[in-house]
Amino acid sequence: MILCFRINSGDTALQKHLRHASGKALYTSTQNELLQISADMVRENILQRISSSPCWALMADETTDRANREQLAIVVRYVDKHGDQFVVREDPVQILELMASIRRGLMKGGTSESDGNSGPLELRMSGENIASVVIEQLRRMQLEPEKLVAQCYDGAASMSSERVGTASHVKAMLKVLIIFTVRIMV
């Protein structure tokens, strides 16, 4: 993708190289790996700033991409000290394919629809399933749940409903996690 942008912007040397170089000498196979390493470095820097903040807020939204896949963006809003001033930052920390993440969570025996049936699990984009994905990502990023002071979602019932939405499930799951963590530490 980046190579296409460079070629379209007039990089004739790159265009000539890609057209005429042998397959082993293209040096394009590492571009995705370099992008992933760069993204991980940026995310690590953001997570360090969040960890030093006294509080943070979770924002998440899902949308369908051009390939018809549900994508979930997780953004964290927090207070960062920059010199002598406090600055409110809002940084994206994760974008993931939602249905694939829900599927992985259900296959690992994660939380699913609690309807009492012992039959096969249904792959749905429910508040509970989305919350499980969000909680798993927060755990992976090692964000401290006791510092979470707010959640922000769009108006969709699966996200913001006080009874069955992601917001209510995240709140309940984090409450259990905080109690569990405190008990282990004591």
Image (tube, rainbow, N blue to C red):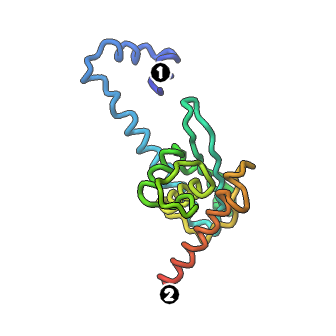
Residue 31 % position (x, y): 39, 33
Q: Quadrant of residue 163?
A: bottom right
Q: Which residue is mark 2?
A: 186
The amino acid marked with disc number 1 is Cys
Q: CA distance from mark 2 to mark 1?
A: 56 Å
For this view, does 19 lie left or right of residue 150? Answer: left
Could you tell me which residue is drawn at 52 percent across and 18 percent down? 9
Could you tell me which residue is drawn at 34 percent across and 34 percent down? 30
Residue 76 % position (x, y): 62, 55
For this view, does 163 lie left or right of residue 173? Answer: right
Could you tell me which residue is drawn at 50 percent across and 59 percent down? 136
Task: Indicate the secondary structure of the residue bearing disc 2.
Answer: loop
For this view, does 166 lie left or right of residue 97? Answer: right
The amino acid marked with disc number 2 is Val
The one nearer the camera, 12 or 83, is: 12
The one nearer the camera, 23 or 83, is: 23
Marks 2 and 1 in Cβ contact (< 8 Å): no
For this view, does 179 lie left or right of residue 160? Answer: left
Task: Indicate the secondary structure of the residue bearing disc 1.
Answer: helix
Up the image or down, 181 lies above or below 95; here it is below
Up the image or down, 180 lies above or below 94; here it is below
The mark nearer the N terminus, 2 or 1, is: 1
Give the label on residue 4, or none. 1
